Amino acid sequence: MKNVLITGGAGFIGSNLCDHFISKDYKVTCLDNFATGHRHNIEHLLDHPNFRLLEGDIRDTEMCRTACEGQDAVLHQAALGSVPRSINDPITSNDVNVGGFLNMLVAARDAKVERFVYAASSSTYGDSKSLPKVEEVIGKPLSPYAITKYVNELYADVFAKTYGMECIGLRYFNVFGRRQDPKGAYAAVIPKFVIQLMNLESPTINGEGDYSRDFTYIDNVIQMNELAMLTDNPEAVNTVYNTAVGDRTTIKDMAQLLKEYLSAYDAEINEVEILHGPVRAGDVPHSKASIDKAKTLLGYKPSHQFAAGLKEAVDWYWKHLER
């Protein structure tokens, strides 16, 4: 495993993966169309001898074939995220997340890529009320986005059985951390609240704030991708794993902790009021993962619990965000 293709490599998670594998002397190819990723996330890598940028779209079959040539592994992060985005535009979400995913699977198969690791999603659990979420027990999807990510799992399973591919899906649970974009209509809750509080603006929580999430720091996600890519345990491949901490935090508690950490930089932030709005369509009330499967089969051990990860993220945002 020396040649790694990271799709969506200029995005939040993808660029962190690029950094990590470049630091470990891998030859990294980044494929991105910059629809949601940013060139500044990978600017520092462009002159590195082991880094190659391909500007292209996973909906382009020829580009996928070009990107997969000579690769040992694919870490597939490219997707159109966001439940609200998929509700507003289900066709484009499906084209990218399902059509693009299938293009990548076919290209990886034809290029004889050894391992295909892909970003799955906790949204696949849908209306399942069981907690913690266990990989083998899911409900019905609650959004077009959730459908697309579940279809990814079905396709990966079929390609493993039909073509002998080695595929591993990582069901990400509310990933946050350095480089996560705070701007735009579909910004994730933590960076969105960070930039608002830094500007002394009141963030708005959807609902009462008692919905809970298994917020997962980026370093835990990097670890899971590396473990999935490198495992030589035959029982560990052709399956899916929760990629999380195994705990949950309410949205209102997260917001309060953000205020506390940011107030160390600017005391006025402590006085900013948190507002409440209507519950958002398609939102799952509670999310908490069981990580027993990842611990047992991959040797996963989260490096960051939520509070420690949030503190690192806040410190990064304060140093890097333009206010």
Image (cartoon, rainbow, N blue to C red):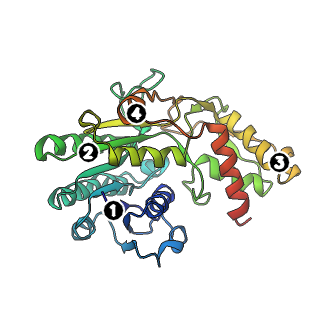
Q: Amino acid at mark 4?
A: Ala
Residue 99, above or below 37: above
Earlier sequence position, callout 2 versus callout 3 = 2
Identified at 38% across, 28% down, the residue is: 296
Q: How many marks?
A: 4
Q: Which residue is mark 2?
A: 167
Q: Quadrant of residue 251?
A: top right
Q: Which residue is mark 4?
A: 294
Q: Look at the numbered disc 4 and give the secondary structure of its residue.
A: helix
Residue 93 locus on image (x, y percent): 37, 54
Query: What is the crowding at mark 2: few (fewer than 14 residues within 10 Å), some, or many (at least 20)?
Result: many
Q: CA distance from mark 3 to mark 4?
A: 36 Å
- Residue annotated with mark 1: 5
- Residue 151: where, in percent of width, then height? 28, 43
Q: From mark 1 to mark 4, how far is it between C-alphas?
A: 23 Å
Picture residue at 33% right of the left edge, 57% below the top: 96
Front position among marks 3 and 1: 1
Is 156 displayed left or right of 88 in the figure?
A: left
Q: Which quarter shows the N terminus?
A: bottom left
CB within 8 Å, label 4 to label 2? no
Mark 2 → mark 3, Cα distance in angstroms: 44 Å
Amino acid type shown at disc 1:
Leu
**Residue 36 at x, y percent in the picture:** 48, 63
Q: Which mark is residue 263?
A: 3
Q: Is residue 102 above or below residue 243?
A: below
Which one is in front in this view, the residue at disc 2 or the one at disc 3?
A: 2
- The numbered mark at residue 203 is none
Distance between mark 2 and mark 1 Cα atoms: 14 Å
Residue kind at label 2, given as amino acid type: Cys
* Left or right of 130 on screen, residue 196: right
Q: Nearer the viewer, mark 3 or mark 4?
A: 4
